[in-house]
Image (cartoon, rainbow, N blue to C red):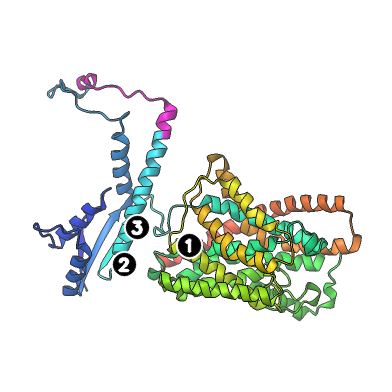
Amino acid sequence: MNTQKLKIQPNENFDNFKLSLLKALHLIDSNKNCLLDFEERIDNYFKRNKTLLVEIDIDVTQLFDTIYDRKFWNQKEYKQEIPENYPMNVSNMEAQAYYNPIVVAEEKYDKDIEKTKKETQLLVDSILLELKKLNKKENIEIKLMGENLNTEISKPKQHFEILDGLRGIAALAIVFFHFMEIVYPPNENFIAHGFLAVDFFFCLSGFVIAYAYNDRIEKMKLSDFFTLRLIRLHPLVVFGSVLGLLAFLFDPFGGHPETYETGKLVLIFLASVFLIPFPVMADRYFNIFGLNAPGWSLFWEYVANILYALFLYKLSRRSLFLLTVLAAAGICFVSQRAGGSLMGGWSGETFWDGCARISYSFLAGMLIFRSNWIIKSKLGFISLSVLLLLTFFIPFSDYNWLTEPLVVLLYFPLLIVAGAGATLKPVFRKLCIFFGKISYPLYMTHYAAMWIFANYYTKYKPETGQLALIMFIGTLILLGVAYLTMVLYDIPIRKYLTDRRKKKSQNPG
């Protein structure tokens, strides 16, 4: 293939870049508006030149700096214009007297800098998206360079911090739910529907995966996608399994590990580490992952990720909608078959319920992104947190067959839609970021303590006041354990694996 390198750079008006490209390829027609049929001109050109590869190097750092300087110094407070009486033949020192000095409070100056940076970044992001669309053409290869450029440039820069915060709220709800379900039957559990937080996770996951990979999955190797997901998810799968094994072996209130043969226990542990469903622990209600019960949802998360990379991302929006409707029918079927409840998927008996739960919610999350169903609103983190928590506090009743599917099919997707377009007040930003980071470590490490708590409750039967204190202190301790796990284990090991992957890709030999 013949290669032609073009030295053209975009600016804040991407149409100028298109015109430069047409000019470089001698496709400009002065009698027509070339931008109207830009795509057609480019496609026809490469049909005639099938063996030509056009390479364009874009310096993103230079692009950012150029746009930033132009935007910042064109602001009224900082703009300097040449005075009418400006002397043309004097020294620079003498000329300074003819300019108006810039007098701006330091606080305002700092705010204007930050504001301009954000505006510039949004503009650069939109230009990068246009470049990525152009880069999908077989005969065009656009390389992005720059010292401030993230190596995975196709990853969207916007971050939905309110959704991160809601993920943390959902993780805390699950911890409370698991404490409560050990002690109280569903009709006496004030957070009886806390288990629906998993369906919220699934919906959020579909939205985030589609958002993060939609514009780059076609250019990625399957192995690269799977490696990225393994690095993100699996360290805590392993750690949760280790915690579960230790809790089982050294539970001070029971557990009876001596009743299990060593070989069987090794198999149970390996199944947990590699997420191979193995529901053989009768004393743990035949959980498909007896050492770390939340592993069931990670199993289906992996399945959804694999199917996304294989074909889901290729679906048209219409096909995706039809598949989501079909999955919604699956949710209704599972609810009816289980007597009106969606609390399945975690045990051998209800294994396939997990498939129905992730199928709808993951697809619904994808559909929200693909359809751009984002509602801009003034709803904040507190309002959305209350709306999310209300679903977990719905009483367990004879109407579960109606309330649970409605929450999963309609309410959770609407919360994602509202959360993606909501306004985050600066005072809650750090909290949302923390909740987002701690949610997954908390979810994957908390259940080892639940088995210990269950054996303690069975042995001592503490009173209500003691239970409340134990649950409160226990939740704080679990948050502390999750934080330490995140800081001392998850973040370092993911950084190590990511760095190793980058070095390997740079030096394949």
Find out whether the residues at labels 3 and 2 contact each other: C-beta distance under 8 Å.
no
Q: Residues within 10 Å of mark 1 (few under 14, many from 20)?
A: many
Drawn side of residue 146 relative to residue 44, left or right: right
- State the residue in front, 292 or 340: 340
The x and y percentages for residue 436 are 58, 53
As shown in the figure, which amino acid type bears the numbered disc 3?
A: Leu
Number of numbered callouts drawn:
3
Say which amino acid is labelled 2. Lys
How far apart are the two marked residues, 3 and 2, measured between alpha carbons? Answer: 11 Å
Front residue of this view, candidates 244 and 33: 33
**Callout 3: few (<14), some (14-19), or many (20+) C-alpha neighbours within 10 Å?**
some
Label whose residue precedes the other's in the sequence (1 or 3): 3
Name the residue rendered at 23%, 53% in the picture: 15
Seen at 82% across and 73% down, the residue is 257
Q: Is residue 114 magenta?
A: no
Residue 27 lies, in percent from the top left, at: 13, 63
Quick one: quadrant of the N terminus?
bottom left
Query: Looking at the rendered structure, which numbered label has been put on residue 263?
Result: none
Left or right: 253 as drawn, with respect to 133: right
Residue 254 can be seen, yes or no: yes
Q: Is residue 65 above or below residue 415?
A: above
In the rendered structure, find residue 368 and report the number of the disc placed on it.
1
